[in-house]
Image (spheres, rainbow, N blue to C red):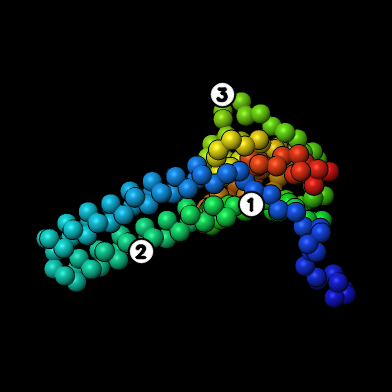
Amino acid sequence: MSVMDDAAPTASSLRVFDLGPRTSWAWLTAGIALLGAAEVVAIAALAHAVLPGWIAAAIDALVGIPTVVLLVAFGSAMTGRITVDAEHLVLRFGLLGGARLPRAEIRRAERFASPAIRPVGLGIGVPSGSRQATATLGGPVVFVRVLLDRPVEVRLALFRRAKADEFVMGTGSPEQLIAALA
């Protein structure tokens, strides 16, 4: 094995695509942040009003820390992207999920129109009873469907995994993504 085999992909072989405009996800994150902050403040006010100080402080930590962790996880999705290099298509959805698709397993990439009976939802997921993974930050995007020869693992949360052999991803540059996979 030579040094060149371990080298990172060059800038010319690496292509990065967005998952669509971040506005919808930003509003969702802001709403969750407001709700989480209101919950933390309400529980803290109630705990400090009726419990001894050290117990109230423990409750503050038990409620506040997980709330902050969840907000960071939701906010991290705004860094979501699709990266294509010579070996893989890598889907990243922040701390909430992602997948690594070997280019050799990609059978076809094409534009995709979401059916009205089962629209593509905001976020990342694999609908129950399906082997179709979906990822979008929302907003006006065109979807690209990537079909694989064999299923690959999709991380949907820290401890949740699923298998999918079809990926539907929203992007602002569908033709460029399809061309990069050709």
Q: Amino acid at mark 3?
A: Ile
State the image quarter where residue 127 is shown. top right
Q: Amino acid at mark 1?
A: Arg
Q: Residue, x 32% and y 61% (percent of image)?
A: 64
Q: Find out whether the residues at labels 1 and 2 contact each other: C-beta distance under 8 Å.
A: no
Q: Which part of the image, by quadrant, shows the N terminus?
A: bottom right
Mark sitting earlier along the chain (1/3): 1
Measured from the top left, where is residue 49 in percent x and y?
12, 60
Q: Which residue lies under the disc numbered 3?
A: 117
Q: Which residue lies under the disc numbered 2?
A: 65
Is 7 or 102 nearer to us in this picture? Answer: 7
* Residue 88 placement, left or right of 40: right
Q: CA distance from mark 1 to mark 3?
A: 27 Å
Mark sitting earlier along the chain (3/2): 2
Q: In the displayed structure, would residue 20 be above or below residue 117?
A: below
Query: Mark 3 packing: few (<14 Cα in 10 Å), some, or many (20+)?
Result: few
Measured from the top left, where is residue 128 in percent x and y?
55, 36
Q: CA distance from mark 3 to mark 2?
A: 39 Å
Q: CA distance from mark 1 to mark 2?
A: 27 Å
